[in-house]
Amino acid sequence: MADKHDGEHRIEIKEVAHQFGWRQVFAPLSASVSGGQTLVISGINGAGKSTLLRIIAGLLTPTEGTVAVTIAGQQQDALSRRNSIGYVAPDLTLYRELSAAENLQFFARLRGITLTRDDLIALLTQVGLRGRGKDLVGTYSSGMRQRLKYAFALLSQPPILLLDEPTANLDIHGVAIVEQIVAEQKQRGGISIVATNEPRELEWGDSVARLELP
């Protein structure tokens, strides 16, 4: 699973705001992040951190402003950028009736990725789940499911990682795994955007953008 994404990556958030019905979620925000950097997005609960990540991922159109995503020097529209993004979020659903390996194979096929047995072992090892690939996800603890979400996010070594509450339900060893993933993303020139209020995770950022209520 060699990294196929070479060149400069950049995300420009320009005066982005969003509204659900009559309620504006957060005041206009501008921020930017380039390859090899981590942007942390903070804000009180309900300030719209998850909403902003969905906008960046191309899953939601902002009410105001624009998000420009450039991968390997090529600007991506909301649809094309999705294959360049690894996403970890509390509402990401895995199939509990399938094993971890079956979940990864299923999502890989949806993305047109072929996973060998060695690829699966490497992914599960990276997230601390080696030897548990045949277990049904329904038997996993919440922390193990969180680790499996990272294996899913890393399927194609994406140039962009979007991490919403990245260490939720993880023990100290799981937190260390996430920190290593973010460090490796930076080393290979990728972008990480982390939505969090955890003091330790705020320190991961090369820059921090704080969402304000309107």
Image (cartoon, rainbow, N blue to C red):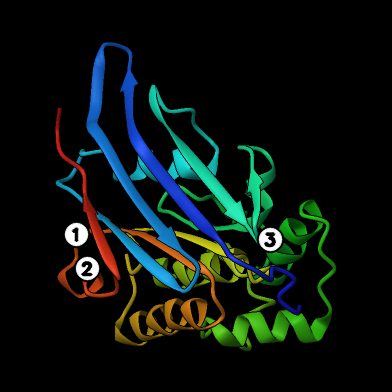
**Split into 4 quadrants, where in the image is the N terminus?**
bottom right
**Gap between marks 2 and 1 measured at Cα:** 7 Å
Residue 145, percent from left and from top: 49, 66
Which of the two discs, 2 and 3, labels the residue nearer the N terminus? 3
SS class, disc 2: helix
In the rendered structure, the answer to whether residue 153 lies left or right of residue 168 reads right
Q: Nearer the viewer, mark 2 or mark 3?
A: 2
Q: Which mark is drawn over residue 205?
A: none
**Gap between marks 2 and 3 measured at Cα:** 35 Å
SS class, disc 3: loop
Tell me which amino acid carries mark 3: Leu
Q: Nearer the viewer, residue 169 or 139?
A: 169
Classed neighbour count for the residue bearing mark 3: other residues with Cα under 10 Å, few (<14), some (14–19), many (≥20): some
Which of the two discs, 2 and 1, labels the residue nearer the N terminus? 1
In the rendered structure, the answer to whether residue 50 lies left or right of residue 102 reads left
Tell me which amino acid carries mark 1: Asn
Can you tell which quarter of the image residue 86 is in? bottom right
Residue 69, percent from left and from top: 55, 48
Residue found at the far top of this picture? 22
Tell me which amino acid carries mark 2: Leu
* For residue 166, above or below residue 23: below
Q: Nearer the viewer, residue 149 or 142?
A: 149
**Gap between marks 3 and 1 measured at Cα:** 33 Å
CB under 8 Å between discs 2 and 1: yes
* For residue 145, above or below residue 189: above
Which of the two discs, 3 and 1, labels the residue nearer the N terminus? 3
Q: Nearer the viewer, mark 2 or mark 1?
A: 2
Q: Which residue is mark 2?
A: 202
Q: Which mark is drawn over residue 98?
A: 3
